[in-house]
Image (spheres, rainbow, N blue to C red):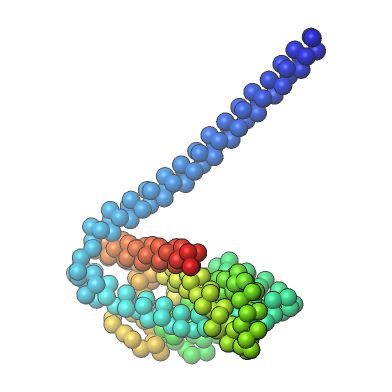
Amino acid sequence: MAEQILAEQILESRYKRRRRRNATATILALAATMVGLGWLVLILGALLWQGFSGLSVAVFTEMTPPPGAAGGLLNPIFGSLILTAIAVAIGTPIGILAGTYMAEYGRHDVLTSVVRFINDILLSAPSIVVGLFIYEVMVAPMGHFSGLAGGVALAVLVIPVVVRTTEDMLTLVPNALREAATSIGLPRSLTITRICYRAARAGMLTGVLLAVARISGETAPLLFTSLNNQFWSSNLNAPIASLPIVIFQFALSPYKDWQSLAWTGALIITMAVLALSISARALIATGKQS
């Protein structure tokens, strides 16, 4: 009897000790979460407060101003759209073709393992390294900065995201669909384009949107490639304005009007990235329902 009571006391003490440890771990986890969320709320609060205060129609209709004058962000917004379009036009086909090979033709090849490993490295590579690489292979031989070099630098950042999402989405397509297409005599190329692509198009498009969201705020690679332009320019063989570079320069300036435009530009990029993220989630939900 005494031994049974002693065993129950030992079990109860262990249970209480484990509950104390669990409560301590839960409190620490919640505290860490609140610290992270607190900084996020502060950053977003400051961005919304400072950004909306300078938001006006002139921001989207006027050029970047000299110090002490009124102006907007029309030319860097236009330049960012051009650079993003170039990056998507270059990076998306390459990424889709590479992901298609990895998922459909060489799923178990050694080359696919090597490409996947390199792609994972590129996904986590610092963007400034990409900018420096494009500077060495394009800007230095050309002898000048250019919008084309900036678009290529962003395309290098787009490719690994599209490759990964394309491979993953095509891998999720059931083999029964491929077998059914093959059974009616459909060539492999048509099976991929008409069956697999259609089944995976929501996820593949989501990957493109995520890639665009990633490059929307990139500053470092553009400093080495497209540099900046204070005027309206669509010449891809010359420096071109971009919103991240203008934000970077205006934020470091001592002029209040430039700093206000920097906050507004940061708000525009944040809203654009948020819209792209929401669109990507909507596409994922649509793909799951279909």
Q: Is residue 73 left or right of residue 27?
A: left
Residue 13: percent from the left, percent from the top?
68, 20
Residue sitting at 32 percent across and 75 percent down? Answer: 76
The quarter of the picture where the N terminus appears is: top right
Vertical relation: 268 (above or below) 86: above
Residue 35: percent from the left, percent from the top?
46, 43
In the rendered image, is residue 235 in sight?
yes
Quarter occupied by residue 66: bottom left
Residue sitting at 79 percent across and 9 percent down? Answer: 2
Given the current orientation, which residue lies at the most extreme front position? 184
Given the current orientation, which residue lies at the most extreme top position? 2
Residue 71: percent from the left, percent from the top?
21, 71
Residue 167: percent from the left, percent from the top?
60, 73
Vertical relation: 284 (above or below) 204: above
Which residue occupies the foreground of this view, 247 or 57? Answer: 57
Which residue occupies the foreground of this view, 278 or 152? Answer: 278
Vertical relation: 121 (above or below) 136: above
Residue sitting at 39 percent across and 87 percent down? Answer: 236
